[in-house]
């Protein structure tokens, strides 16, 4: 079965650092009964949950690396003292990494109890001793890059993740980021002719982004595409993919935020840069797997934002 992240229409379940720590803590009663002598985290994914487990259990922490191509396991640093090991990774999709590393440690004469935050019961061929089942596509804070276009291209071949394909991929709004947003005063009105008539002036202060790893996702409608591309070319900028708001998406803020969150997820963005603070908060709440920045061109500064949806009082 293919990695579920290849379905670009799937919104992942984002597991935050504090949620992950609670999920690990809920598994550690059995680990305590087993009486491990140390915790071993599998680099890279197992290092954060391994550190959390070691901290809760007050045990020493060691690290191993796994070379997926060669199928080999090696210690990072000197091999630790201790026979009974709590072996930790972040999640089990196929289970191949955890099972292979476990077998290598057993061959060293050690005993292993395995732990992951979550595992996929639909596809994993190895079930950890301690874990939470999760059939939904999950996303850890440290693995955002798996979903980038280059990351997905690698995973589509059946290969595992590789950090060389996981560099940040940016989604950016046009208004207030690349040009002055004179439309804001008209309460999100659609004025596609504003670009063609040069009412929008280019901004000198831009946020950091990589042009070859970016997509513009704008609230401006599809009918404005030609004018936007013409304006973009006249600024002498290299080509960048452009997503315009579909005609069936209303221009009111909630619908626009949904469209941006879904488009950024479909593209595999790790970051989203937005100049409207309300939109930034809405996108962050809808897609917590994105690193969302509220950008101020006048101050040439960005603020990383986070939000959660709360129900209005009745």
Image (cartoon, rainbow, N blue to C red):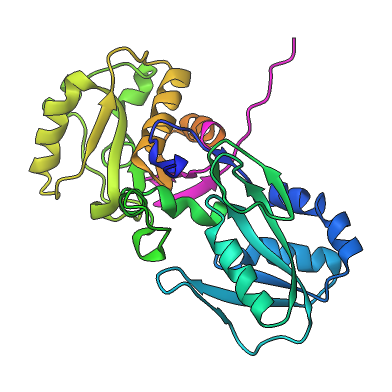
Between residue 157 and residue 183, name the one nearer to us: 157
Between residue 251 and residue 46, name the one nearer to us: 46
- Give coordinates of residue 192: x percent, y percent: 20, 21
Q: Which quarter of the picture shows residue 219?
A: top left
**240 displayed left or right of 290:** left
Stretch in magenta? 286-314
Total numbered labels placed on residues in the image: 0
Residue depicted at 12% across the width and 45% down the height: 235
**118 displayed left or right of 45:** right
Using the rendered image of the protein, determine whether residue 226 is visible from the camera's viewpoint.
yes
Q: Which quarter of the picture shows residue 309?
A: top right
Queried whether the magenta region covers residue 306, the answer comes back as: yes
Between residue 181 and residue 121, name the one nearer to us: 121
Residue 244 versus residue 312 in the image, above or below: below
Residue depicted at 51% across the width and 48% down the height: 303
Using the rendered image of the protein, determine whether residue 174 is visible from the camera's viewpoint.
no
Q: Which quarter of the picture shows residue 13?
A: top right
Between residue 172 and residue 243, name the one nearer to us: 243
- Give coordinates of residue 297: x percent, y percent: 37, 45
| In the image, farthest residue toward the top | 314
Residue depicted at 42% across the width and 74% down the height: 70
| In the image, farthest residue toward the bottom | 78
Queried whether the magenta region covers residue 11, the answer comes back as: no
- Give coordinates of residue 240: x percent, y percent: 20, 44
- Give coordinates of residue 181: x percent, y percent: 31, 31
Identify the image quadrant of the C terminus: top right
Residue 138 versus residue 127 in the image, above or below: above
**175 displayed left or right of 121:** left
């Amino acid at each position: 079965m293919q990695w579920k992240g290849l379905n670009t229409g799937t919104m992942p379940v984002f597991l935050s650092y504090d949620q992950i720590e609670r999920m690990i803590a809920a598994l550690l009663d059995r680990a305590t009964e087993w009486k491990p002598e140390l915790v071993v985290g599998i680099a890279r994914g197992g290092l954060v949950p391994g550190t959390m487990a070691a901290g809760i259990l007050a045990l020493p922490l060691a690290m191993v690396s796994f070379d997926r191509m060669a199928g080999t396991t090696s210690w990072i640093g000197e091999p630790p003292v201790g026979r009974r090991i709590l072996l930790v990774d972040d999640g089990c999709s196929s289970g191949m990494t955890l099972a292979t590393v476990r077998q290598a440690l057993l061959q060293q004469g050690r005993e292993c109890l395995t732990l992951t935050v979550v595992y996929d019961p639909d596809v994993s061929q190895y079930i950890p001793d301690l874990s939470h089942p999760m059939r939904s596509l999950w996303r850890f804070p440290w693995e955002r890059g798996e979903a980038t276009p280059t990351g997905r291209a690698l995973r589509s071949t059946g290969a595992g993740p590789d950090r060389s394909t996981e560099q940040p991929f940016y989604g950016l709004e046009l208004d207030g980021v690349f040009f002055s947003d004179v439309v804001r005063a008209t309460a999100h009105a659609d004025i596609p002719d504003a670009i063609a008539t040069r009412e929008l002036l280019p901004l000198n202060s831009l946020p950091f982004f990589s042009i070859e790893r970016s997509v513009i996702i704008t609230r401006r409608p599809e009918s404005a595409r030609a004018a936007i591309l013409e304006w973009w070319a006249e600024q002498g900028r290299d080509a960048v993919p452009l997503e315009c708001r579909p005609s069936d998406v209303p221009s009111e803020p909630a619908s626009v935020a949904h469209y941006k969150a879904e488009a950024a997820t479909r593209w595999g963005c790790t970051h989203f840069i937005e100049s409207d603070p309300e939109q930034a908060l809405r996108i962050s709440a809808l897609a917590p797997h994105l690193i969302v920045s509220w950008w101020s061109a006048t101050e040439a500064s960005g603020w990383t934002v986070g939000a959660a949806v709360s129900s209005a009082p009745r």
